[in-house]
Amino acid sequence: MNKPKKHILVCTSSRMTGQQKGYCHTKEGVQIVANFLDEIEERGLGDEVFVSNTGCFGLCEQGPIVVVYPDNIWYGKVSPDDVEKIMDQHIEGGKTVKELEI
Ligand code: FES
């Protein structure tokens, strides 16, 4: 396995117990992860772009939160429908999605 060029972290409100319970989970955090996984596979980027679900980033009121490293770009109020745009514009196009940045 290679280190990814981009690592996308999506808050699904995962807790230490393994339970997913919290704001981003109620706002389709899991669907956002699923959409990223689908987009990465469809684009053949599985060796370069990883997605992981995470626990709370402490910004629940701005959730669902998506963080892209190594760019250190944080997106807020992300919906499942925003995933394609983040993939097109940021991950493949190299330009952040300004209207979602926090
Ligand atoms: S539950 Fe997602 S930022 Fe807090």
Image (cartoon, rainbow, N blue to C red):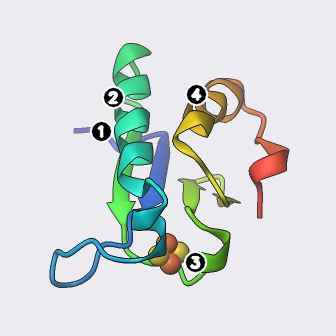
Q: Most extreme residue toward the front, as rendered?
A: 26
Mark sitting earlier along the chain (3/2): 2
Q: Give coordinates of residue 1: x percent, y percent.
A: 22, 38
Q: Quadrant of the C terminus?
A: bottom right
Q: Residues within 10 Å of mark 3 (few under 14, many from 20)?
A: some
Residue 15 figure quarter: bottom left
Which mark lies nearer to you, 3 or 2?
3
Residue 84: mark in rendering: 4
Residue 20 figure quarter: bottom left
27 to 47, vertically: above or below: below
**Which residue corresponds to the image point at 71% horizontal and 28% vertical from the top-left?**
89
Cβ at disc 1 under 8 Å from ligand 1: no
Mark sitting earlier along the chain (1/4): 1
Three-letter amino acid code of the residue under disc 1: Asn
Kindly check if marks 2 and 1 are in contact, taking CB atoms under 8 A apart as contact.
yes
Mark sitting earlier along the chain (4/2): 2
Residue 22 placement, left or right of 87: left
Mark sitting earlier along the chain (4/3): 3
Residue 2: mark in rendering: 1
Q: Give coordinates of residue 83: x percent, y percent.
A: 56, 36
Which mark lies nearer to you, 1 or 3?
3
Cβ at disc 3 under 8 Å from ligand 1: yes
Kindly check if marks 3 and 2 are in contact, taking CB atoms under 8 A apart as contact.
no
Residue 47: mark in rendering: 2
The residue labelled by disc 3 is 60
**Label 1 secondary element:** loop
Mark sitting earlier along the chain (2/1): 1
Q: Give coordinates of residue 78: x percent, y percent.
A: 62, 51
**Which residue corresponds to the image point at 45% horizontal and 45% vertical from the top-left?**
32
